[in-house]
Image (spheres, rainbow, N blue to C red):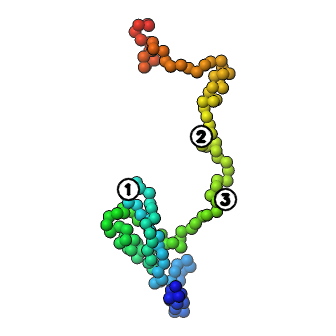
Amino acid sequence: MTDDLDQIARMLDEGAPVTPGEPPAGVLEPWEVFRQEKDGDAMRHGGNVLAPDAELALHYARELFGRRGESIRLWVVRRADIHVLEDLDLLQPPLDRSFKKPGGYVMRDKLAAARGRAGTSKPGARAASHDGTGRRSEGER
């Protein structure tokens, strides 16, 4: 760790250009690798690699997770670019949207109440005198 800090200090003293949010050139940083084993599968975390830049991180990830054909797709993301949202209050929806869930809406009870108000009973099975098309059979015409 102190070697990395010394290297950064040396580069800053020498006037090496540093872009905000970008580590100085040559400093190894962790890159997270996500892989997909076959088409249609979800991307899964495969591990991480240490690399100074995105190009080498991709190369290292391909060597570690793709050289034997065990992955068809790789995502390589700088660990510093991953943001975590852990506040449970922010993860809950701000409004009650239970009306959008089908479990809260039962038609059977509403149909029974409507039939009771109309004075009809639940429709029975089709009579044997009707065929599957809704027409009467030959014997009853």
Disc 2 residue type?
A: Gly
Residue 108 position in % (x across, y down): 60, 30
Query: Which residue position holds label 1?
Result: 39
5 in relation to 54, above or below: below
Q: Residue 6 carries which label?
A: none
Q: What element carries label 3?
A: helix
Residue 55 in percent (x, y) is at 41, 75
Q: Mark 3 points at which residue?
A: 89
Residue found at the very far left of the displayed protein = 68
Q: Which of marks 1 and 2 is in front?
A: 2
Residue at the spot of label 2: 103
Task: Answer few, some or many: residues within 10 Å of disc 1's Cα (few below 14, many 20 plus, some between 14 and 19).
Answer: few
Q: Which residue is drawn at 60% across and 19% down?
A: 121
Local packing at callout 2 (Cα closer than 10 Å; few below 14, some 14-19, many 20+) is few
Residue 8 visible? The answer is no
Q: Residue 45: percent from the left, percent from the top?
A: 45, 64
Q: Which amino acid does label 3 sit on?
A: Asp
Task: Answer whether labels 3 and 2 touch (C-beta < 8 Å).
Answer: no
Q: Where is residue 136 in the image (x, y as percent from the top left)?
A: 44, 12
Q: Is mark 2 on a helix, strand or loop?
A: helix
- Name which of mark 1 and mark 3 comes first in the sequence: 1
At 38% from the left and 73% from the top, the residue drawn is: 59
Question: Which of the marked residues, 1 or 2, is nearer the chain's N terminus?
Answer: 1
